[in-house]
Image: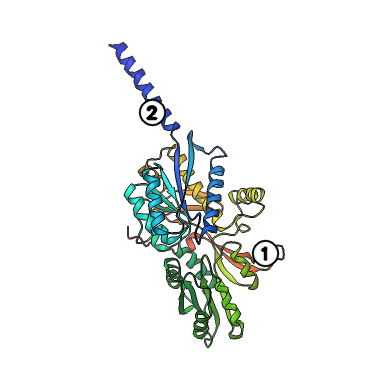
């Protein structure tokens, strides 16, 4: 009998070892669904670079967690909601991914959220910005390392909100623009918002919109500001050609990718708040990213490169905590309230809506002949606790 028990124990141990071995042999599969092509291709490419560099950094170059190899499967959503939706479903169902990251566009993200819920798998949103992603369209499988419209807008409001300031907004007519303006408006305590201008995302001629903005501001007393929220194609800064200075009107905007910030060179002294600029955060993660990006690409990392890296670090940190276990409920429990280091310093997933709470940077543009873009110099870091970012998901 004793022999029998001992033999069973040995068999049980062997089985456990086999299961553990199978578990460690099994790859951790991550889908990255993003705009490889389409209008936001430049953003998507940066996120992909950042994601891969972040996985490398967080795993110490091994691309493994708890002995399990990380495999990234890329999917192109082409910037189209229906394509993103079907690519994510295919990733969960056919590629058997453990979790997914992406997408680039807010419109695509909103189409993808129900897919994560249907397959009961995590979708880590990076870098789509619309508030509704972690707001009314949210479900418990959604986390976001990217900043949301409110964080963008509130930080810009903090930078511009002074007594005697009148503001008009210029934004794109879709979720990103409208959510941004709504949050910006809500965050203003002292300045006055007098006009909202929404234009189609593919606008190239800004004359009519600009005229309406000028008319709304020109006769107002105090500091007059047009605050721009824009992404992708089109150059809203063309409105400056209409001689805003004659009416004493300034332009303000948030940060952007480096090529878009070439236009900022024409506006020395322009203020706003940004999510990231490689020269601003001082921490070991950002130092690694900047040094290695320069080494590999002969250029600094950009806005969305930092975001991709933050997403990768969040995933690896969570998997380290679960010892490589990719069980969705275990990951959700682990990630809620989790703190992790990123190129922007520490982020925390807020338990209520899984939005990453993070610092933003109030900047002033300086022209430096060494750079082809306007350089955002740090005025001050806006800490997460200074921004009353609303919880909008009615959880």
Residue at position x 36%, y 44% from top?
93
Q: Is residue 139 visible?
A: no
Q: Are marks 2 and 1 in contact (CB under 8 Å)?
A: no
Residue at numbered disc 1: 372
Residue at position x 49%, y 65% from top?
152
Residue 166 screen position, x and y as percent: 51, 80
**Dot 1 lies on which element?**
loop
Look at the picture and state if 29 lies above or below 367: above
Q: Would you say 224 lies left or right of 101 here?
A: right
Q: Quadrant of residue 29?
A: top left
Residue 68 screen position, x and y as percent: 47, 35
Query: Which residue reaches farthest left?
Result: 1
Residue at numbered disc 2: 19
Q: Quadrant of the N terminus?
A: top left
| Label 2 vs 1, first from the N-terminus | 2
Residue 306 screen position, x and y as percent: 55, 54
Q: Which class describes the residues within 10 Å of circle 1: few (<14), some (14-19), or many (20+)? A: some
């Amino acid at each position: 009998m004793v022999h029998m028990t001992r033999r069973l124990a040995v068999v049980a141990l062997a089985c456990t070892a086999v299961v553990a071995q199978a578990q460690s042999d099994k790859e951790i599969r991550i889908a990255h669904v993003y705009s490889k092509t389409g209008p936001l291709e430049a953003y998507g490419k940066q996120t992909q670079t950042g994601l891969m560099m972040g996985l490398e950094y967080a795993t110490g170059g091994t691309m493994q967690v708890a002995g399990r190899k990380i495999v990234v499967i890329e999917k192109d959503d082409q910037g189209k909601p229906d394509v993103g939706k079907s690519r994510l479903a295919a990733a969960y169902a056919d590629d058997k991914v453990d979790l997914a990251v992406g997408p680039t566009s807010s419109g695509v993200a909103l189409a993808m959220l129900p897919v994560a819920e249907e397959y009961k798998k995590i979708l880590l949103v990076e870098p789509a910005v619309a508030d509704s992603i972690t707001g009314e369209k949210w479900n418990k499988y959604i986390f976001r390392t990217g900043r949301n419209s409110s964080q963008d807008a509130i930080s810009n409001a903090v930078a511009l909100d002074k007594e005697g300031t009148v503001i008009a907004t210029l934004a794109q007519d879709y979720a990103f623009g409208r959510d941004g303006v709504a949050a910006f408006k809500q965050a203003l305590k002292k300045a006055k918002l007098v006009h909202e201008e929404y234009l189609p995302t593919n606008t190239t001629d800004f004359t009519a919109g600009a005229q309406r903005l000028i008319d709304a501001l020109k006769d107002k007393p105090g500091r007059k500001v047009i605050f721009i929220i824009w992404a992708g194609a089109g150059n809203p800064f063309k409105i400056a050609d209409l001689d805003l200075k004659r009416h004493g009107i300034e332009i303000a905007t948030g940060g952007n990718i480096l090529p878009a910030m070439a236009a900022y060179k024409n506006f020395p002294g322009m203020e706003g708040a940004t999510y990231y600029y490689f020269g601003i955060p001082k921490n070991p993660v950002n130092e690694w990213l900047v040094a290695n990006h320069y080494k590999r690409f002969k250029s600094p990392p950009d806005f969305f490169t930092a975001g991709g890296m933050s997403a990768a670090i969040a995933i690896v940190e969570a998997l380290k905590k679960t010892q490589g276990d990719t069980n969705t409920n275990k990951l959700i429990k682990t990630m809620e309230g989790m703190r992790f280091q990123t190129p922007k310093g520490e982020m925390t997933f807020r338990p209520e809506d899984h939005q990453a709470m993070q610092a933003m940077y109030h900047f002033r543009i300086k022209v430096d002949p060494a750079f082809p873009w306007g350089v955002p110099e740090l005025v001050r870091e806006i800490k997460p606790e200074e921004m009353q970012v609303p919880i909008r998901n009615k959880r």
